[in-house]
Amino acid sequence: MKTPTSATSLLRQLVLSPQRSILESLIPGATNMATFAQQLLKGKGTTFTYLVYLIGILTATKPVAINMTCWLQKYFTSTVHIQSSNETYDMLASWITSRGLENAARSFLAKEGPGYYNEKISVTCLGRSSVILKDLLKECQEEYLSHIENSTTIFGHSGAQWKKEKAKRTRPLSTVILRENEKNSLIQDMKDFLEPQTRSWYSEHSIPYRRGYLLHGPPGTGKSSFSFSIAGELGMNIYVVSIPSVDDESLKTLFEELPDTCVVLLEDIDAVGSVYCRELERPNNDLEPGKEKKGVTLSGLLNVLDGVASQEDRVLIMTTNHIDKLDPALIRPGRVDKKVKFQLADREVTMQIYKFIFGQPTEQSSKKTSHAKDDPSIERQAIEFARRVPEEQLSPAQIISYLLQHRHMPRAALTNVGKWVEALRAESDQHRNFLE
Ligand SMILES: Nc1ncnc2c1ncn2[C@@H]1O[C@H](COP(=O)(O)OP(=O)(O)OP(=O)(O)O)[C@@H](O)[C@H]1O
């Protein structure tokens, strides 16, 4: 191999010069790299040694490349880091997923803290100016807000930590089928409470501005569905706690972390005190060694409802299937201001459900979704169907589930209704016999 004299002499100077330590401190591995290059250019060695030299050069240049990247990043790019706790995170994540870019990201998830994931997104762009990043975040925000305009964000929890479950398209209240006057009076009560004048009135009279609702009734009558829907209608996020899944401590923490304005849904409040009471019934009132007392106690729940964490501006909805099991202290006025019974389907509700399933919705998101009001045949079938379903014995959930099996065949739904009712009766007789 012919040796380019000027290049080798330059490399020799680099390797031997007294400034090599300065060079090395600037670019780690630079002298090694120069030695390898010098040998290579002199043409000393076999293919194997060239290969070794090459690997050596690559290894030696790795720190240089890393240093260069850091240096370029520091002086020629701008970066924004967004933690998942920041509202902008959702906006950016939604922008990224809507463009299918999530798999293109080099790193996305960082695990921090014990036991839970705290995600972070970092976006880097070329150039020292942050204008591009600001424009990007603005675009994400606009896009996100337009998406969630008609949606309700539902928060569940994992232990004592709120977790955003999903942003669901707001379910129109018209699709939760209840006795009309009871439904309207409940909606009106909630809306009146949230009027600015009501708030001022409470403040002038120094009365804590909060209102509690108890929705009670058999399973599958629409208590939860109504709560989600009304939250959407009121433009508020909903925070859901299933009482059997928490204890005093986690309930307290969850309440402390609620935002100022929201709907709080406490489901199955008849479970309050159940574990506690069972523990009290144990002989000598002792607990198994190492076993902690779990569950929400009555005093734990009352403290949360009345305490500092029960800030104002909040609509509290509690649900139960067993109002008779509730302690009167829990549902006294001030804690529960309005009780509404969700009932099994009467004839009118059954008819509405039939029309809801088989009619054509004319307005998707409006308050007045009308279901085939003008279709006389569906109207007639609905009357006939409701006549064949026993009144106040079945829940809306049961009726909807049956009709959904026939959703493409309204006639079949009508023809088979008798058999279905008989089967349900037989099932419930069997269940009763089993219990006796
Ligand atoms: N009144 C109703 N109008 C429309 N859909 C209903 C109604 N009641 C129940 N459903 C449907 O039945 C299912 C169960 O309803 P939901 O969970 O709201 O009942 P629930 O009364 O809260 O029951 P639970 O007491 O068991 O929690 C949902 O899919 C819901 O859409």
Image: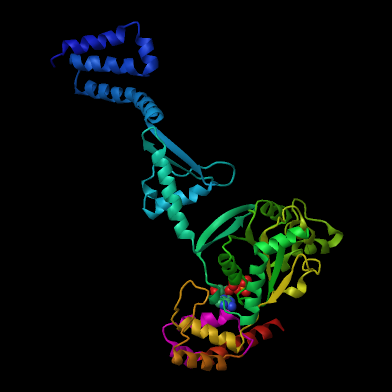
Query: Residue 352's spot in the image, x, y percent?
Result: 54, 84
Residue 74 figure quarter: top left
Of residues 293 and 362, the one nearer the viewer is 362
The quadrant in which the N terminus is found is top left
Ligand 1 is found in the corner quadrant, namely bottom right
Query: Residue 195's spot in the image, x, y percent?
Result: 65, 64
> In terms of secondary structure, what is the magenta stretch mainly?
helix
Q: What residue is rendered at 51% in x and 60% in y? A: 167
Identify whether 220 is placed above or below 153. below
* Left or right, 239 with reference to 356: right
* Left or right, 300 with reference to 367: right
Does the magenta segment cover residue 269? no
Q: Which residues are magenta?
A: 391-416
Of residues 129 and 1, the one nearer the viewer is 129
Q: Is residue 242 visible?
A: no
Of residues 146 and 70, the one nearer the viewer is 146
Does the magenta segment cover residue 407? yes
Identify whether 3 is placed above or below 424. above
* Left or right, 307 with reference to 263: right
Q: Which residue ends up furthest to the top in the rendered image?
A: 18
Query: Residue 11's spot in the image, x, y percent?
Result: 25, 12
Q: Is residue 408 visible?
A: yes
Residue 423 figure quarter: bottom right
Query: Residue 205's spot in the image, x, y percent?
Result: 78, 60
